[in-house]
Image: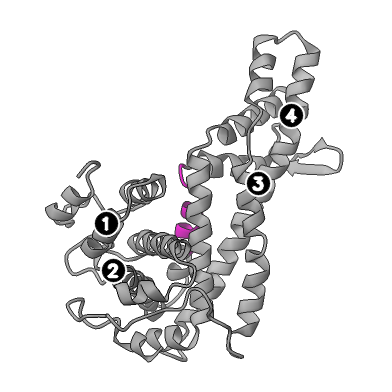
Amino acid sequence: MGNLLRVLHCKDEPYDEIFLDFEDARPSEAEKEVYTQVSHVLSFAPGIIKELEAYKGAGGQIREAIQNPSSEEKQKEAWDAIIPLVHQLKRFFEFSHNLEKCLQQLLKALTSEEQSTTQHLEAKQALAKQFAEILQYTLKFDDLKMNNPAIQNDFSYFRRIMSRRGMNNSSSIIDYAEGQFISTELANKMSLFYAEATPMLKTLSDATTKFVSENYQCEAERTSEVLSTMCNICKVMLENPVHMKRFQMGEDTVHFCLRVMVGVIILYDHVHPTGAFCKGSRIDIKGAIKVLKDQHQGPMIVNLLNALRYTTKHLNDETTPKAIKSLMQPGS
């Protein structure tokens, strides 16, 4: 783990010996309290991903209800089909806020003044792994959401029915199914959440920005260092065949590292004043893009490249070198 201490030196320095154990990092005594709390929240993530993968929507019933506005039977069928889906979408949304809290807990643990950034990463690899797991979940969730328009369509239909039934008072609590309640205020927030192309990334970006704004400048600087360090570690691990051989889970760990690398680039770009793409960035952005493009160009890689193109903040700034902008063009 001591090799992590070299990671924030100049980017020209080779990092061949740097390795962060994303497969089997175990919490130390100092990590256990935060690790246990975050671990409990993360235990629900696989189930949510499975539910989202299986999400079919109520498009058929909604179309029938719209085409037959005078049919009470068709209206009831559509409403009955929508109710369990709204329940799912509500749980997904609530989980995003639990993840937001976890992210801020981890950032606080990894940026406190008691140790330097590199010392934190050296001593708290289990927390770094959890941070990475949140990013992996986030990008998986957003990939699935982007490719499933039924999610936004279903919730939009639910909102229209709420409005039609006079359930539009911001203080009203709606019993939309037996024992299932939702306030109009919450429905409005959910609507904004699902209107985002990448809602989980937006949630984490906002949470990271809020964390930085609420802390002193040293914490802001440490946050940027944590993100850039993790990105550079992932890049080196992915381009170093020696490290690749150490991945016990093979391709799964490669995909994990790729998602984490992209996730921290996006967060860094939203948090750092000049972003991830400018000359002098702590992130080796050109190297990270090259690592992505060197992979087999399947749907996951296409989605990760699109996340960099469309969810970052500074890619199109004047300070971004033309070579980087050219490299990020689709088809380049």
Nearest to the eye among marks 3 and 2: give it: 2
Q: Which residue is mark 1?
A: 294
Q: Which residue is mark 3?
A: 51
Q: Position of residue 193 (x, y in %)?
A: 55, 45
The residue located at (28%, 68%) in the rendering is: 239
Q: Which residue is mark 2?
A: 239
- Can you tell which mark lies on residue 142? none
Circles 1 and 2: CB distance less than 8 Å?
yes
Quarter of the picture containing the C terminus is: top left
The amino acid type found where label 2 is placed reads Glu
Q: Mostly what secondary structure, the magenta segment?
A: helix
Nearest to the eye among marks 4 and 2: give it: 2
- Can you tell which mark lies on residue 81? 4
Nearest to the eye among marks 4 and 1: give it: 1
Residue that lies at the very extreme toward the left in this rendered image = 322
Query: What crowding class fits label 2: few (fewer than 14 Cα within 10 Å), some (14-19), or many (20 or more)?
Result: some
Q: Is 176 above or below relative to 198? A: above
Q: Is 72 above or below relative to 115? A: above
Nearest to the eye among marks 4 and 3: give it: 3
The local secondary structure at tag 1 comes to: loop
Q: Position of residue 123 (x, y in %)?
A: 48, 88
Q: Position of residue 5 (x, y in %)?
A: 33, 88
Q: Position of residue 234 (x, y in %)?
A: 36, 70
Circles 4 and 1: CB distance less than 8 Å?
no
